Image: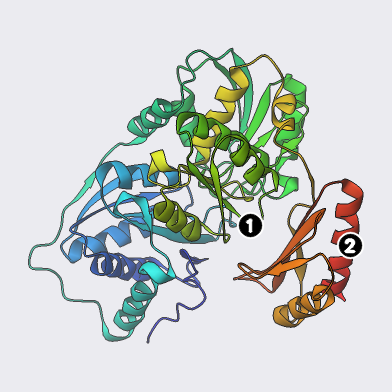
Amino acid sequence: MAADLSQIVKAYDVRGVVPDQWDESLAELFGAAFVTVTQADAIVIGHDMRPSSPGLSAAFARGAAALGADVTLIGLCSTDQLYYASGALDLPGAMFTASHNPARYNGIKMCRKGAAPVGQDTGLAEIRELVERWSEQGAPAVAPKPGTITERETLTDYAAHLKSLVDLTAIRPLKVVVDAGNGMGGHTVPTVFEGLPLDLVPMYFELDGTFPNHEANPLDPANIVDLQARVIAEGADLGLAFDGDADRCFVVDERGEPVSPSAITALVAARELARHPGGTVIHNLITSWSVPEVVRENGGTPVRTRVGHSFIKQEMAATGAIFGGEHSAHYYFADFWNADTGMLAALHVLAALGGQEGTLSALVAQYDRYAGSGEINSTVDDQAARAAAVRAAYEGRDGLTLDELDGLTVTAQDWWFNLRASNTEPLLRLNVEARDEATMAKVRDEVLALVRG
């Protein structure tokens, strides 16, 4: 019987419950389909700490090798460490992770050589089609000469590459609390931070895919309360929180207050523009007004794009951008094959803070200029109907511009909001920003009344 992959093949990756929605037999077919679509004669595979990850990644390797591809296994790694391996070895890659999803989930993030993304328009639809066909008709014929499967260690090279991009040797000593959430940050942080003038206070570094302390999703404020308390208790200079596969990094200041990813985007953009004068910086349409402002103030060209890593990476390649940032704490670097790495963003923050005497809150104040709502999710029965009601309420009003680059964005002189439908859940996501808190709250409440009405 053919597998129905409609529930697990998403816009950018494969993700679902194991073994209910997918298992090792399907993983093996995904491996065969991946090398078929990418026409790869060699690939690299890594995995996170979830209980199902070793078995799924090994099955994927078998499927790839059966069709003649040589497989390099790098074992436990963060997603950006897999991107490093794809870039440095110039091989297509597959990372087994479900990022911040609960323990019963797993998934595959795939890329072509040089960490170029594989999404619906760049090979994922063809991969799904092959897996569905083979699950019904039987696996493809084995190659006359199957590929080899070998192991390779990449963590030390990954750490050295990151530290070659940001000079931390001359910074003042800093005390930093890191919450790895029992995810892959517990694997990568000790090696990356080794030899730096940092007093590291580790939290939840034990690799445990059942997430015994809290979900490894720092975007949810509930999951950073332990970090916030620990930063204050330790008198630390800052705190860092990584998600499950450690490709995103969230920052809290010395007061335990979260620093918005937009402020981090602006800070890193200013630093990258100092290295690459006149460069282009990508930002998605939900980042703060402060991001394009800071880019222009530092002599750069801001480019606005849709939300999502495949759009950011495509735009970076098309424009030759030096850096890109998203409101969700994904940070993309030209020096890292246009791929996202929260660890490199964290090193930039440490370098910026350690290169001056002030506090982090004082440092980021220049980049945090407006009042933002954060992302507010509303469960709705009919996404399209509720979004249309919001559009109708604002259409034709004087002094407003509306655009639909990604969802609906309404912009006034003193505020803007974006309303987007979730691709995977019956949700509408609202982000509002204004020049002051009272205006932001007024606009937020007005839109939410329409969405939830």
* Drawn side of residue 391 relative to residue 319, left or right: right
Q: Which one is in front in this view, the residue at disc 1 or the one at disc 2?
A: 1
When the figure is inspected, residue 49 is found, relative to residue 144, above or below; the finding is: above
* Drawn side of residue 393 relative to residue 334, left or right: right
Choose between 46 and 313: the one closer to the eye: 313
Q: Secondary structure at mark 2?
A: helix
Which residue corresponds to mark 2?
445
Q: Quadrant of residue 38?
A: bottom left
Choose between 121 and 252: the one closer to the eye: 121
Q: How is the image coloured?
A: rainbow
Q: Residues within 10 Å of mark 2 (few under 14, many from 20)?
A: few
Kind of residue at disc 2: Asp
* Residue name at image x 26 percent, y 81 percent: 138
* Drawn side of residue 132 relative to residue 374, left or right: left
Q: Quadrant of residue 300?
A: top right
* Residue name at image x 45 percent, y 48 percent: 48
Which residue corresponds to mark 1?
285
As measured in the structure, the alpha-carbon distance from the residue carrying label 1 to the one carrying label 2 is 21 Å
Outermost residue on the left side: it is: 144
